[in-house]
Amino acid sequence: MKCLSLFFLSILGLSAAVQAENLAVATSPLPDAPSYNRRFWTVENTVGFGVLGSLVAVDAITTQQGLSQGHREMNPVMRPFVTRGAAGEGVGSALGFGAALGTVYLLHRTHHYKAERITMRLMVGTESAVVVNNIAALH
């Protein structure tokens, strides 16, 4: 009999604990899920696009210097632009920079933040390699 009363008492205690837990959950609402909406123009993106813009400008200048020394544009997509002088070079560079900006912004809007950062760094690295290649070809 003592064992049976202990069993019922433990069932009653567990039931009270479960009901108290349900009551505590019902009275305190769950907090909102954390929001990962980040701003696009962070310091990292601002510096990245500033560096990319200056590299594009240096690429345009060194490309025009190379063309005036008899070199040939190696990029077949940019070749029609750069052979039209500084104005064509400016249009081609603006299109390339706009494509880079659009790609990174598209990744940002689709919440691919890691891919956004990787893509930005790859674009800066690639443009840096192009600039170094142009400078090496000029000397």
Image (spheres, helix red, strand yellow):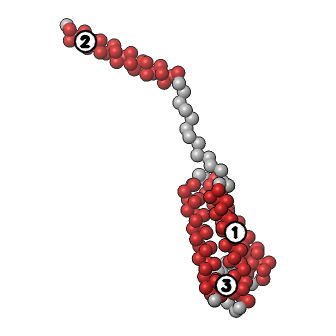
Residue holding disc 1: 53
Callout in the foreground (1, 2): 1
User: Does the image show residue 114?
Assistant: yes
Seen from the viewer's position, the closer of residues 94 and 62 is 62
**Where is residue 128, by image quadrant?**
bottom right
Residue 37 picture location, percent across and down: 62, 46
Q: Secondary structure at mark 3?
A: loop
- Mark 3 and mark 2 in contact? Answer it, CB < 8 Å: no
- Answer with mark 1 or mark 2, whichever residue precedes in sequence: 2
Q: Amino acid at mark 2?
A: Leu
Q: Secondary structure at mark 2?
A: helix
Distance from disc 3 to disc 1, alpha carbons, whole Å, reads 20 Å
Residue holding disc 2: 6
Residue 17 drawn above or below residue 133 = above
Residue holding disc 3: 73
Q: Secondary structure at mark 1?
A: helix
Residue 24 picture location, percent across and down: 48, 21
The residue positioned 64% from the left and 63% from the top of the image is 48
The residue positioned 33% from the left and 13% from the top of the image is 12
The quarter of the rendered structure image containing the C terminus is: bottom right
Callout in the foreground (3, 1): 1
**Hey, which residue is sitting farthest top in the picture?**
1
**In the rendered view, does 63 fall on the left or right side of 22?**
right
Neighbour class for label 3 at 10 Å: few (<14), some, many (≥20)? Answer: some
- Mark 3 and mark 1 in contact? Answer it, CB < 8 Å: no
- Answer with mark 3 or mark 1, whichever residue precedes in sequence: 1
The residue positioned 71% from the left and 78% from the top of the image is 60
